[in-house]
Image: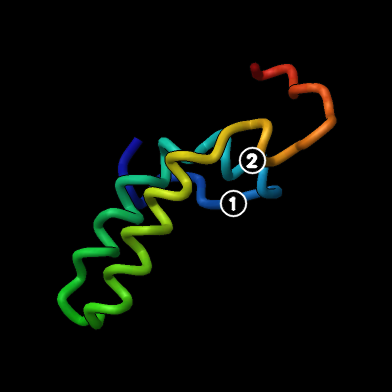
């Protein structure tokens, strides 16, 4: 799917988590934009690292996993 055709509607945090692979490249591109300050680039970088480390249990503690898993 072309970048401009990517469905960017996100229903909730779980939807974003499940679709993170679709959004990760865009986030990485944003981190390298030349008009961002060094601080902004670092924050985006660490948000990407954080998103990569989040697991299903972090989003729904004590709840059964969604059927996608």
Against 30, is 63 above or below? above
Which of labels 2 and 1 is toward the front?
A: 2
Quadrant assignment for the C terminus? top right
Give the crowd class for mark 2: few <14, some 14-19, many >=20 residues within 10 Å. few
Q: Secondary structure at mark 2?
A: helix
At a point 57% along the width and 40% down the height, the residue shown is: 17
Against 22, is 36 above or below? below
Distance from Cα at disc 2 to Cα at disc 1: 9 Å
At a point 20% along the width and 70% down the height, the residue shown is: 33
Q: Is residue 22 left or right of residue 2?
A: right
What is the x, y in percent for residue 39? Answer: 29, 78
Numbered label attached to residue 9: 1
The furthest residue to the right: 63
What is the x, y in percent for residue 27? Answer: 35, 55
Confirm or deny contact between disc 2 and disc 1 (CB under 8 A): no
Quadrant assignment for the N terminus? top left
- Residue 40, by quadrant, is bottom left
Q: Label 2 belongs to which residue?
A: 15
* Count of marks, rendered view: 2
What is the x, y in percent for residue 58? Answer: 66, 39
Which of the two residues, 56 or 25, is positioned nearer the viewer here? 56
At a point 50% along the width and 45% down the height, the residue shown is: 7
Against 52, is 43 above or below? below
Comes first in the chain, label 2 or label 1: 1
- Residue 32, by quadrant, is bottom left
Q: Is residue 34 left or right of residue 47?
A: left
The furthest residue to the left: 34
What is the x, y in percent for residue 18? Answer: 57, 34
């Amino acid at each position: 799917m072309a970048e401009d055709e990517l469905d960017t509607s996100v229903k909730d945090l779980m939807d974003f988590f499940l679709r993170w692979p679709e959004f990760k490249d865009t986030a990485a591109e944003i981190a390298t934009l030349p008009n961002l300050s060094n601080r902004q680039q670092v924050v985006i970088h660490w948000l990407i690292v954080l998103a990569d480390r989040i697991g299903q249990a972090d989003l729904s503690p004590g709840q059964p996993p969604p059927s996608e898993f």
